[in-house]
Image: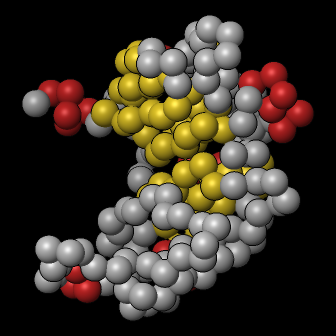
Amino acid sequence: VKRIDIAEFASVRPSGLIAITLEEDDHLGWVSLTGGEDEVMLVTRNGQALRFSEKEIRPMGRQAMGVIGIRLHPGDSLAGLEVVEPNGDLLVITQKGFGKRTDLSEYSPKGRATMGIATIDKRALKDIGKIAEARVVQESDEISLISRGGIVIRVSVSGISTQGRATRGVTVMNLEEGDSVAAIARIPEQSLTE
């Protein structure tokens, strides 16, 4: 992870600007706008979640590689980066269409570069799939899910049950054999009324 002052991107050339230097086997996953005083959540595919203050990431130049955000167990990878919102929930959706919301208060802030805490029942990963996506949501939002097979559904966040951290969740999207969740999009309440 890295933090860059937005002023570094004030003059973008037609050919673009370098925003981060990456190792050959890495790629940029997410970019979020923060206010300098926010907390962020990192969630892994195998169900670890880490909440920490963005102040733990010193501002860097555009060419810098960044610092470790979350330490990963072997075979794990990042599934999402989200900015914490007041009264929000962490929504996780698995590859096999299971999902749940957990109140953000259940994720106490930890130090950057630690392994975080469990956000799903890891014993159930074989049945429910690894985490496909994670989003910070409000109860009044909606989400749209798309499967690798091209099926799209739209669901009210309030219809997804709130559960503790280390639980397996409920079926949010029914998938045919061989299909899996590819992506989800959050549709905030203000977008629904416009």
x then y, percent, for residue 112:
65, 75
**Eyeballing the image, is 5 above or below 84?**
below
Instruction: From the viewer's side, name the closer residue of 147 and 36.
Output: 147
In this view, which residue lies farthest toward the left? 194
Residue 28 place in picture, x, y as percent? 49, 64
Most extreme residue toward the right is 123
Q: How is the image coloured?
A: secondary structure
Percent coordinates x, y for residue 93 in the rendering = 59, 32
In the image shown, does 155 or 147 lie closer to the viewer? 147
Residue positioned 64% across, 29% down in the render = 95
Q: Is residue 188 left or right of residue 122?
A: left
Q: Residue at x 42, y 69 (%)?
A: 38
Residue shown at 39%/28% (left/top)? 143
Q: Nearer the viewer, residue 23 or 114?
A: 23
Q: Quadrant of the N terminus?
A: bottom right
Position above or below: 164 against 73: above
Name the quadrant of the C terminus.
Answer: top left
Tell me if residue 178 comes above or below residue 93 in the rendering: above
Res 67 → quadrant = bottom right
Q: Residue visible at 45% across and 33% down?
A: 184
Judge whether 49 appears above or below 40 on screen: above
> In the image, residue 60 lies at what x, y percent?
43, 90
Q: Splitting the image into 4 quarters, where does residue 108 fall? A: bottom right
Residue 177 shows in the view = yes
